[in-house]
Amino acid sequence: MSWTVEPMRPEELAVCAAIERHAPDPWTEAQLAEELSFEGARLFVVRRGDAIAGLAAFQLAADEASLNTVTIHPSFRRQGAARALLCGALEALKAEGAAVCFLEVRSRNTPALALYDALGFSRAGLRRRFFTNPPDDAIVMNRLL
Ligand SMILES: CC(C)(COP(=O)(O)OP(=O)(O)OC[C@H]1O[C@@H](n2cnc3c(N)ncnc32)[C@H](O)[C@@H]1OP(=O)(O)O)[C@@H](O)C(=O)NCCC(=O)NCCS
């Protein structure tokens, strides 16, 4: 069965927050709800059939998109869900005028770094000790859309 990518709906917040608990820096349901209310926020879910497999949250400002979180539930990992989610979301953002996408990723997050490399993101800088709990450097990456 293939993946579908759609904007997140308010009634999906609780499921998305439960998936977020599997992320290194999880967003709570309240944080996701607040984010969903922001004009520049663009949140997406990826589903297989009726099941939500993961979510991604972006901000769009002028022609710049930034990826703030992407999480796939462990039971759906390594099946192409994140690839489908980010490709679908980036297409939608490009159609809205985004020309570039930025992100920051923990330097020790090997799966995420491999994902972004596979999707054509380039390493643009390093922010030392940007992350806490546990402390980690951030690798700044970007990709033209
Ligand atoms: C990172 C994450 C989103 C990847 O989701 P996923 O659905 O498993 O990724 P996909 O199946 O779409 O993988 C696409 C490509 O990314 C790379 N990749 C993904 N996970 C990987 C892993 N664990 N090890 C090595 N490469 C990996 C591979 O190149 C993969 O292509 P392939 O399967 O053809 O080899 C997922 O592991 C996750 O939710 N992690 C916790 C949250 C997180 O760290 N988010 C990133 C915050 S910046």
Image: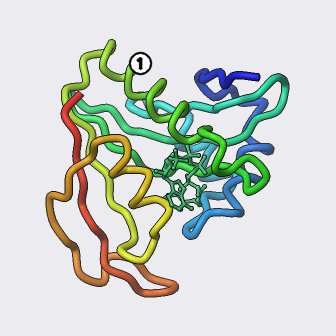
| SS category of the residue bearing label 1 | helix
Q: Residue extending furthest left?
A: 124
Q: Is the shortest distance between ligand 1 and the CB of mark 1 under 8 Å?
A: no
User: What x and y, as percent, mark residue 15?
Assistant: 79, 43
Q: Residue at x 31, y 79 (%)?
A: 137
Task: Quadrant for residue 6, please give it.
Answer: top right
- The correct choice, above or below, for 128 with respect to 126 in the image is below
* Residue 55 horizontal side relative to residue 114, left or right: right
* Residue 45 horizontal side relative to residue 87, left or right: right
Q: Nearer the viewer, residue 39 or 78?
A: 78
Task: Quadrant for residue 66, please give it.
Answer: top left
- The correct choice, above or below, for 51 with respect to 31 in the image is above
- Colour theme: rainbow
Q: Residue extending furthest right?
A: 50
- The correct choice, above or below, for 21 with respect to 42 in the image is below
User: What x and y, as percent, mark residue 116?
Assistant: 37, 50
Q: Residues within 10 Å of mark 1 (few under 14, many from 20)?
A: some
User: What x and y, as percent, mark residue 32?
Assistant: 61, 46
Q: Name the quadrant of the C terminus.
A: top left
- Tell me which amino acid carries mark 1: Ala
Residue underneath mark 1: 92
Q: Name the quadrant of the N terminus.
A: top right
User: What x and y, as percent, mark residue 21?
Assistant: 71, 62
Q: Residue at x 60, y 23 (%)?
A: 5
Q: Residue at x 68, y 26 (%)?
A: 9
Q: Residue at x 57, y 44 (%)?
A: 34
